[in-house]
Amino acid sequence: MTDHHDISDAHDICLLLRAHGEQRWLISEVLPVLREIEQPSSIPEDQLGAALAYLEVLWLGARRRATDTDAARAELDLLDGDRDRVLYDKARRYHAAVRRLRGAVGRRAIALTRAGTAADAADHQHARL
């Protein structure tokens, strides 16, 4: 890992960059697929399973990014000493906003993928009868 002792506020900046990357992934990758699946009749029935699988893969990527973002926050919280208080507060607020977005998107994504799994199981059970 690179030594950042000569960079002022490296952990604050790292958290800002991680949070920004996570937010962009949620907004530009996950949300468009989520919205399309939620829209009635926007995806043909025979392609819905593939769309739900794709959403699940995107959500796994989002969770990986969330882990990295939360790790950056934990590193920031461990630091003592002098820091740019304004930058520190902005990084913490941005992280909190991204966590709220993550929670909202996650609830919708998980509900859809669970519903898709339940529907697939019901279809499979019905076909066996």
Image: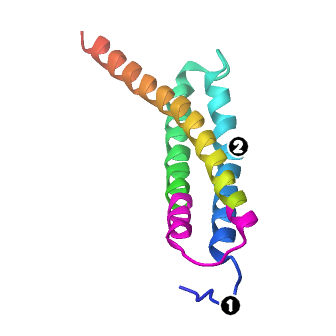
Task: Report which residue position mark 2 lands on.
Answer: 27
Task: Please provide percent x and percent y for residue 38.
Answer: 62, 22
Q: Residue 48 location in percent, x, y?
A: 54, 26
- Tell me if residue 99 is in the magenta stretch: no
Q: Position of residue 16 (x, y in %)?
A: 69, 62
Q: Please, which residue is most extreme toward the left here?
A: 129
- Decide: few, some or many residues near mark 2? Use Cα within 10 Å; few <14, some 14-19, many ≥20: some
- Left or right of 129? Residue 61 is right
Q: Nearer the viewer, residue 117 or 69?
A: 69
Q: Quadrant of residue 35?
A: top right
In the rendered image of this protein, does residue 41 appear above or below residue 54? above
Residue at which label 1 appears: 6
Give the colour scheme of this rendering. Answer: rainbow
Residue type at mark 2: give it: Ile
Gap in angstroms between the C-alphas marked 1 and 2: 34 Å
Decide if residue 76 is on the left or right side of residue 42: left
Q: Quadrant of residue 105?
A: top right
Q: Is residue 73 placed above or below 39 in the rendered structure?
A: below
Can you tell which mark lies on residue 110? none
Report the residue that reaches farthest toward the top.
129
Magenta part, dominant SS: helix
Q: Residue at x 68, y 21 (%)?
A: 42
Nearer-the-camera pick, 58 or 15: 15
Give the magenta part as a residue range: 69-88
